[in-house]
Each structure stands twice: as C-alpha cells, then as structure tokens.
Image (tube, rainbow, N blue to C red):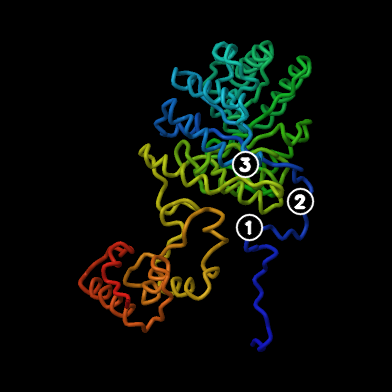
Amino acid sequence: MTTPDERPEYFEDVFPRDGFPRYGWTERPADLPAQAWTTETTHRDGQQGGLPLTAESSLRIYDLMCAFTGDSGAIRQAEFFVYRESDRAALQGAMERYESGAPIEPTTWIRASVKDVQLIKALGVAETGMLASASDYHTFHKFKPGGRAQAAESYLDAVRATLAEGIRPRLHLEDATRAPWEFIAPFVESVLALCKAAGLRPKFRICDTMGLGLPYDDVALPRSVPRMVRALRGLGLAADELEFHPHNDTGLVTANCLAAVRAGCAVINGTLLGKGERTGNAPLEQTLLHLIGMGYYADAQPDFTALNDLAALYADLGEPLPAKYPLYGRDAHRTRAGVHADGLNKFWWMYAPFNVPDLLGRPLEVSLTKDSGVAGVVFLIRQHLGHDLPKDHPTVQAAYAWLTAEFDGGRQTAVEWEELAPHIALPA
C-alpha cells in the first residue's frame, strides 16, 4: 500500500538520469586496480574473424576508435598484423596518426618465433604481442617431440630477439584456461628474468581462447579467471602488466572480463562491437560501460555515440551487427509489445536501461505487430509528428483499425512508421 505523499524510489544513486548504471558497492573489491582500460584487436582478431579489411578501411576503423576514445584513455593500444602489405600500410598510417597526437598506440602481433621478430624490427613499434601457446593441447602437438620444453625454449629465443631490438614483449598465453600452471609459472618467471636483464618489463595476456574460462573464485585452475589473474599477480606482475583476452564461445565473455578486473587485471583486450573469430571477442563497449559503473572514467568518458558510425561501416563492409546485438543492434532498443509501448508513453524510463538517446545517440523505438495495441500507434505519432494524442482520438483509432485489418488478413511482418504514416490523418 502507498500513501498519498509517498515518493517513488528510482534508486537514482545507481541508475542516474545522466549516466550509465553505477555499482552500489557493499564492499569494494580489495584487488580492484586503481585504473582499468582496454586494448583493441580489430585489425588482428577482427580481421582473422572475417572482417574484409583494406588499408583504407583499417584506418577508418582506427579513426573511429580514436573518436570513441577521445581524451578518456579508454582504449590505449591497437594491434596490427604485419604479414601482408595492406596490413603494414594500415600500421604505418596508424603510427603516423599516433605520432601526430591520436590517442591509441599501434602495436604489432606476431608468433613467438625468431623469424617473426625479423618482420617487425624495422617497423618502429615500441611493443609487440607474441603468440605463446600455453596448453598441452597446443604444445604437445605443435612442438614435436619436445612438447612443453621445446615450446618454452622457442618462445624464449623469440623474447631474446625482441629484447635485442629494444622492443617490449607482450606474451600472449594462448589457451591459458586449459593450460597447466606447471608450464605457465616457470615460463613467466623465465621471461621476467630475461627482461630484467635487458631493463624492460614484459606484459602477459591471459587468453581464454576457446571461451572456457569461468568468472568464479571457487573453481580450480585453469578455468577460474580470477584465480589465474591472482596467481600471475603473485609472480610479481603489476595490474597494468596483465591483459585478459577472452572469446565468447560459451557466452561468458563480458562476465569474465569483469571478473578479471575485479581480481586485479587492469587491461581488457577485445574489439569494439565484439568482432572476432567464431563467436567474437570481448565487446569493449559493453566492458567499458561496466567499468564506468565501477567508478572508472569519472573525469572523461568515451563517446559511445561514435560507435553508430562504426556499426554503419561494418554494414557497408558486409559484416552488419546482428539485429539484437546489445546496445547497437538495429532492434536493441525496439519493442513490439503493447504493454511496453504503453509504458514508454507513460514514463519512458520504465523500459529503458539508461538514457539511451543521450548516451548512445540511438532512439527508443516501437515496431507494430498484432500485439502492439493502440499504445504503439500513440507512441509513433508522438515520436515522428510530435502530437501527444489520447488512445481514443479519431486519428489513432483510424490508424489502429487499418493496422488490425492488416493482421486480421494474415500479415505476419511488423509495420514500421513509413508504412503507417499514410494512414495518419491529423486535423488541420
């Protein structure tokens, strides 16, 4: 029961009207890094996953990443392939932009082999990623007959070659969530020793290559993402020397990213809008939305409206987002239910997770079906014509009668505004 003077509780401390939802901490995680940010792999893993990138389109994506990032520091690095001329041209263009003040540092991605180090030594990069397969699924079948020992020595030779060129190594521990700690720990310690002698600090990327990681502390290694992060921190790695790179094969990609940050990993690697191999990489925009909720980026936030242009670019490249892709899919903020349309008419916050129009630059939308009711017609008239008409208004009733006849006649597809508009007769 409510009283006449009782005010509604909207929990605006965690659901602010001018920002993304915030975390109402009951206890702030002890391992939470002081800063957290992301790095991008569209030009590597996104392309590997099917994006048909030319040097021109690669640089357009890089420019949109920079527009999204602005002064926020949300994305700090982007990695590039170097095996083809078009990839090297894209890398060079990005490096020129970075030297002229663009906010995202270009790095390279190679296999941890001496041969691949030769490809990058003259490119001018300060850091390179190096694929170092870590699980026995890889080491026992890629390195015969030596297995783990042969794999480790091959990787360490590549690290030595990288250090000789003055390039900071970033070791990508491929398939880490199926890898034995008995391999990872001594390998990491060996890399640390080599880098200490060279006066450089390495980075390590925890790769949940098959999306098998779990975001729970009460799961054993190697599947527990937070346990893996804490174990690597225990070897002496700082929060900003660890990255987490997951895939979404089992649907836990964003949850695992947040678990990694909460456990003390400062950097999440993925792609804007989740492009990547198989089911995709970590969608950085979703991860960053939650990092903002955790309290990061209080002084400067990335511009989420810039990603509408990136979504349009992917459509132009023949790789459109799924219609129901979170935040930026065509139907991400579209309802077809009459009860939802009625709620939007009465108090649009009822069916909006946050201020979608302002924060994302996307409208709340209604498509009309046999279940949309009169409320859907009212919503569209107000949205497109600016008239707030009651449900019993003759204009509304006439449009709804036409709509009902369509579906009574067997129509199954939704009606959009462009088709409804000719049946709207407003008085002069």
Residue most extreme to the left:
409
The structure residue drawn at horizontal position 74% and vertical position 39%, both measured from the top left corner, is 230
Among numbered discs 1 and 3, the one appearing first in the sequence: 1
The structure residue drawn at horizontal position 69% and vertical position 34%, both measured from the top left corner, is 242
Question: Residue 222's spot in the image, x, y percent?
Answer: 64, 38
> What is the quadrant of residue 129 in the picture?
top right
Among numbered discs 2 and 3, the one appearing first in the sequence: 2
Please tell me whether residue 104 is drawn above or below residue 392 in the rendered image. above
Judged by depth in the image, the label closer to the viewer, 1 or 3, is: 1
Please tell me whether residue 348 is drawn above or below residue 32 in the rendered image. below
Question: Residue 220's spot in the image, x, y percent?
Answer: 67, 43
Q: What secondary structure is marked by label 2?
A: loop
Quadrant where the image shows the N terminus: bottom right
The residue pinned by badge 3 equals 223
Q: How far apart are the alpha carbons under marks 2 and 3?
A: 21 Å
Q: What secondary structure is marked by label 1?
A: loop
The structure residue drawn at horizontal position 46% and vertical position 43%, both measured from the top left corner, is 309
Q: Are marks 1 and 2 in contact (CB under 8 Å)?
A: no
Judged by depth in the image, the label closer to the viewer, 1 or 2, is: 1
The residue pinned by badge 2 equals 29
Question: Residue 403's spot in the image, x, y percent?
Answer: 28, 73
Judge the density around disc 1: few (<14), some (14-19), many (≥20) Cα neighbours within 10 Å: some
